[in-house]
Amino acid sequence: DFSFPSHDWSVVYSHVPFDRPYTIPSDFDPNLALALVWADTMNEAKQRADRFIRETKIKGKDSSGNSITTNLHYLKDNLDRLLTF
C-alpha cells in the first residue's frame, strides 16, 4: 500500500507506480517520494503537513519479510523543528 492524500495545497512526486504492486530493487534510492505542502503562513503549513503525514499510507514487506521502515513518525514528531526558517 503506497498512497498519499490529494489536496489542492500539496503535490507528490515519485517514481513508484500507484496503480500496481511494485518491488523496490535492492539498489534503490531511499527517497521513494517527495511531498510538497504549502500555505499562506508557517503555522498553517505545519498543520497541513501534519494532516498530510497522518493521511499517508506506506505499507509493505522488505525482502526478509519485515515491515517497511519509513520516516513518517520522525517527520510528524519533528515538524516544529524541521519547518523553521
Image: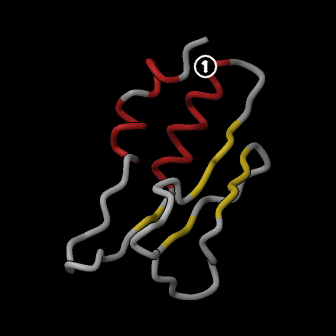
Front residue (pair 85, 51): 85
Residue under the point 64% across and 25% down = 44
Tell me if residue 40 comes above or below residue 37 in the rendering: above
Residue under the point 41% across and 37% down = 76
Q: Is residue 28 left or right of residue 64?
A: right
The percent coordinates of residue 34 (x first, y second) are 62, 50
Tell me if residue 26 comes above or below residue 23 in the rendering: above
Tell me if residue 39 comes above or below residue 54 in the rendering: above
Residue under the point 73% across and 51% down = 11
Can you say which quadrant of the picture contains the C terminus?
Answer: top right
Mark 1 Cα-neighbour bin, 10 Å: few <14, some 14–19, many ≥20: few
Q: Mark 1 sits on what residue? A: 43
The percent coordinates of residue 13 (x first, y second) are 69, 57
Q: Is residue 37 left or right of residue 47?
A: right
The percent coordinates of residue 6 (x first, y second) are 69, 59
Q: How is the image coloured?
A: secondary structure
Front residue (pair 9, 59): 59
Front residue (pair 16, 38): 16
Toward the bottom, the furthest residue is 20
The percent coordinates of residue 39 (x first, y second) are 74, 29
Residue type for callout 1: Asn
How many callouts does the rendering have? 1
In terms of secondary structure, where does tag 1 sit?
helix
Toward the front, the furthest residue is 27
Within the image, what quadrant is residue 33 found in? bottom right
Q: Is residue 67 left or right of residue 79?
A: left
Residue under the point 72% across and 46% down = 10
